[in-house]
Image (tube, rainbow, N blue to C red):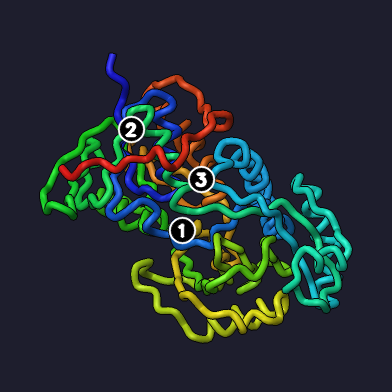
Amino acid sequence: MKSPGVIIIGAGSTGSALAHDLALRGLNVTVIERAGVASGTTGHNQAQLHSGARYAAVDPESARECIAENRILRRIMPEVLELNEGLFVTDSADGLDYLPLFLDACQDCGIPAQVVPVEQALRWEPQLNPQILAAVQIPDGVFEPYRFCLSFLASAQSNGAEVHTFNEVVGIDAQRCQVEVHNRRTGSMQIFTSDAIINATGPWVGKVAGLAGLNVEVEPSAGVMVNLNQRVCNHVLNLLAPPGDGDIIVPQRNSSILGTTSWSVTDPEDISIPSEHVDLIFSVAERMVPSIRNFAIRGVMAAARPLLVVEGAGGRATSRGFACYQHSAEGTPGFFSVVGGKTTTARLMAEKIGDQVTAYLHCDKPCNTKTTLLLSYRKWSALPIS
């Protein structure tokens, strides 16, 4: 008996993790991505493997998800991660006041958080502000977004998944589970048919759902990041305070990513970078690394986060959690959408939406991605142009 087929729209972190999840469960998986792998939000994020500490005091559910997935990713994709740990530091009395709440919140969420002597932190990080008053070590890390996705996709390919990059979905018949696709390399058109369709397009999830005549609410929240031309630290540096703008420095390969800011936009493809945001990022970053303005800027970028729409919230106040929707009420039970989340929680998001899809398809196979070691990103192979 032929296994059910699933079309996944989007090859960012969520779509890639989902392809691995469903292919591992034995489904026939086809991934359709309008550009390259990780070409959207995933490829333009701060590359931080979150411990959850950032959210522990303000969004404990997301914090617990982050620390659990942090531990899983360390096991299943060690080749992609730099496990350099993180430091929360403060140079102010307000930070010292926040410290007990921060430590209690981390403990409640199961996040290891250890106060380290300031002298030790300064030995670890010579560029660190010598005026810091406290430092806390937490298990943050760094990933490479492109290789993150390729590891999931290479593993999915080994289980029969097909990945069609530079193919844009231009029409969806959700009742027939069909998508019309424009091959951006050749200009040809093609119809793909399956038993279920999953919309995993991040901040574009509403736009793609609209092709099927469906409504999915998402808040595209833009954020500016500054990339420096060398590493200024080896730990991920965080300001010891509630989440705010410009309060993280992430070492990534031979560069450093400073960020990020947050504001709502209407179009994730049309984001103008306000110059004052760059100034704000540097002003906060130099509280952690006073010499930060002495390093050359490699580039400035902005991307939109696909935040959940929550009444009375928005931007920093919105949960970094996620939601999975089956559009049965709209008469299209074979169409699914996933909204929100973070790259750190992509595997978990894939598990949850995968459970919904397999239940719908009466495919009684559990998720095994928690324990399955991913293939190397080097095993990825692009499909030939068709």
Question: Residue tagged by mark 2?
Answer: 161
Q: Residue at x 76, y 45 (%)?
A: 110
Question: Residue tagged by mark 1?
Answer: 306
Q: CA distance from mark 1 to mark 2?
A: 26 Å
Query: Considering only vertical position in the picture, is 26 above or below 198?
Result: above
Q: Which mark is residue 346?
A: 3
Give the x, y percent position of residue 325.
43, 43
Callout 2: SS: loop
**How packed is label 3: few (under 14 Cα within 10 Å), some, or many (20 or more)?**
many
Residue 52 visible in the current orientation: no
- The quadrant holding residue 286 is bottom right
Give the x, y percent position of residue 183.
17, 50
Residue 66 visible in the current orientation: yes
Give the x, y percent position of residue 236.
67, 61
Query: Considering only vertical position in the picture, is 70 above or below 50?
Result: above
Give the residue type at disc 2: Ala
- The answer to which of marks 3 and 1 sits earlier in the sequence is 1
Q: CA distance from mark 3 to mark 1?
A: 13 Å
Circle 3 or circle 2, nearest the eye: 2
In the rendered image, the quadrant that contains the C terminus is top left
Give the x, y percent position of residue 364.
45, 19
Whether pointer 3 and pointer 1 mark residues with C-beta atoms closer than 8 Å, the reply is no
Position of 262 with respect to 56 (left or right) is left
- The answer to which of marks 1 and 2 sits earlier in the sequence is 2
Callout 3: SS: helix
- The answer to which of marks 3 and 2 sits earlier in the sequence is 2
Q: 248 or 192: nearer the eye?
A: 248
Q: Residue at x 70, y 66 (%)?
A: 238
- The quadrant holding residue 178 is top left
Give the residue type at disc 3: Ala
In the rendered image, the quadrant that contains the N terminus is top left
